[in-house]
Image (spheres, rainbow, N blue to C red):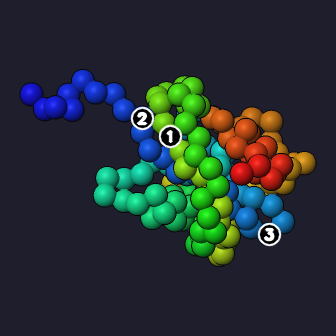
Amino acid sequence: MNMLDGLRNPLPTVDIIIKWQDGVVLIKRKNPPSGWAIPGGFVDYGESLETAAVREAKEETGLDVRLVRQFHTYSDPGRDDRFHSISTVFLAHGEGDLRAGDDAGEAGIFNKNTLPDNIAFDHRDILEDYFSGRY
């Protein structure tokens, strides 16, 4: 029997608040849960958080990003209804041509006053923290 059998651990994820043009990039998810979201995803085995952030940003938005810094880590067990995840959020600057990719149906630019109504996960809270200057 493997010593890890039966253990349930949170899954590490990254989200990237990408500053681009006059706002931040959000993607509209193709897969459940539906809604707009900060680009991001799961950290692969053997991958650093930083490498995962750059990879996920490219896969979902087509943008090359320069990470500026870690913003904050969000770990509320209820932040994703599917399972317990822990997300480290990065701030980044994007370059290139914005296009939806991977599991993104659309990509858009938003600011504090133009956020869409349907935002997935706890990403509205994260964006409120960002726009208010918290952390």
Residue 21 shows which numbered tag?
3
Is residue 103 in sight in this rendering?
A: no
Q: Are marks 2 and 3 in contact (CB under 8 Å)?
A: no
Contact between marks 1 and 2 (CB within 8 A): the answer is yes
- Does dot 3 land on a helix, a strand or a loop? loop
N-terminal-most mark, 1 or 2:
2
Can you give x and y, in whole percent of width and height, for residue 49 in the image? 46, 58
Indicate the quadrant containing the N terminus: top left, top right, bottom left or bottom right: top left
- The residue lying furthest to the right in this view is 113
* Residue 86: image tag: 1
Closer-to-camera residue (109/46): 46
For marks 2 and 3 on the same chain, the one whose residue lies earlier in the sequence: 2
Q: Which residue does the numbered mark 2 point to in the structure image?
A: 10
Q: Residue furthest front?
A: 135
Q: CA distance from mark 3 to mark 1?
A: 29 Å
Residue drawn at (55%, 36%), measured in percent from left and top?
75
Mark 1: few, some, or many residues within 10 Å (few <14, many ≥20)? many
Which of labels 2 and 3 is toward the front? Answer: 2
Instruction: Identify residue type, mark 3.
Output: Gln
Observer able to see residue 45: yes
Amino acid bearing label 1: Ile
Q: Which amino acid type is shown beneath numbered disc 2?
A: Pro
**Picture residue at 41% right of the left edge, 60% below the top:** 48
Element type where label 2 sits in the image: loop
Report x, y in % for residue 45.
Answer: 31, 53
Residue 56, given in percent of the width and then of the height, sits at 51, 58
